[in-house]
Image: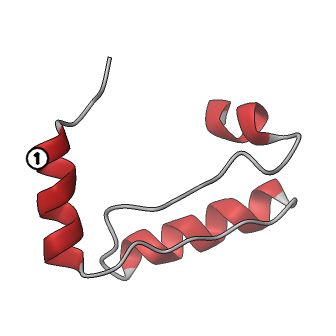
Amino acid sequence: MAQFTRLEVAQAMKETGMIPLFFNNDIELSKKVLKAFYGGGARLMEFTARGYFLMKFLES
């Protein structure tokens, strides 16, 4: 089940004005970058399933 409605996501996109995209095979570096995005005001981030470690990352 979705945590946010489509309207809530669209509103966050409008308010933020950006959707940062980042990918790196290093889990710890990825966590730091995503935390930096959040600290900078981003509330939406695109994290694509490019790496073999995606499920491990999402579980941590």
Q: Does residue 50 appear left or right of residue 52 in this picture? A: left
- Image height of 52 relative to 18, above or below: above
Q: As displayed, is residue 46 above or below residue 54?
A: below
Q: Residue 21: where, in percent of width, then height? A: 57, 71
Query: Which residue occupies 79% across, 51% down?
Result: 50
At label 1, counting other C-alpha atoms closer than 10 Å, the crowd grade (few under 14, some 14-19, many 20 or more) is few
Q: Secondary structure at mark 1?
A: helix
* Front residue (pair 38, 14): 14
Rendered image coloring scheme: secondary structure
Q: Quadrant of residue 52?
A: top right
Q: Residue at x 75, y 40 (%)?
A: 54
Residue reaching furthest to the top:
1
Q: Nearer the viewer, residue 42 or 36?
A: 42
The residue drawn where x is 13% and y is 48% is 8
| Residue at the image point whose x is 79% and y is 54% from the top | 27
Left or right of 2 on screen, residue 59: right
Amino acid carrying mark 1 in the image: Leu
Answer left or right for 25 relative to 37: right
Location of residue 60 (image quadrant): top right
Percent of width and height locating residue 26: 86, 61
Q: Is residue 16 above or below residue 30?
A: below
Residue 13, given in percent of the width and then of the height, sits at 23, 67
Count numbered badges in the picture: 1
Q: Nearer the viewer, residue 43 or 50?
A: 50
- Picture coordinates of residue 10, whole percent (x, y): 18, 57
Instruction: Specify the quadrant that holds the N terminus.
Output: top left
Which residue lies under the disc numbered 1?
7
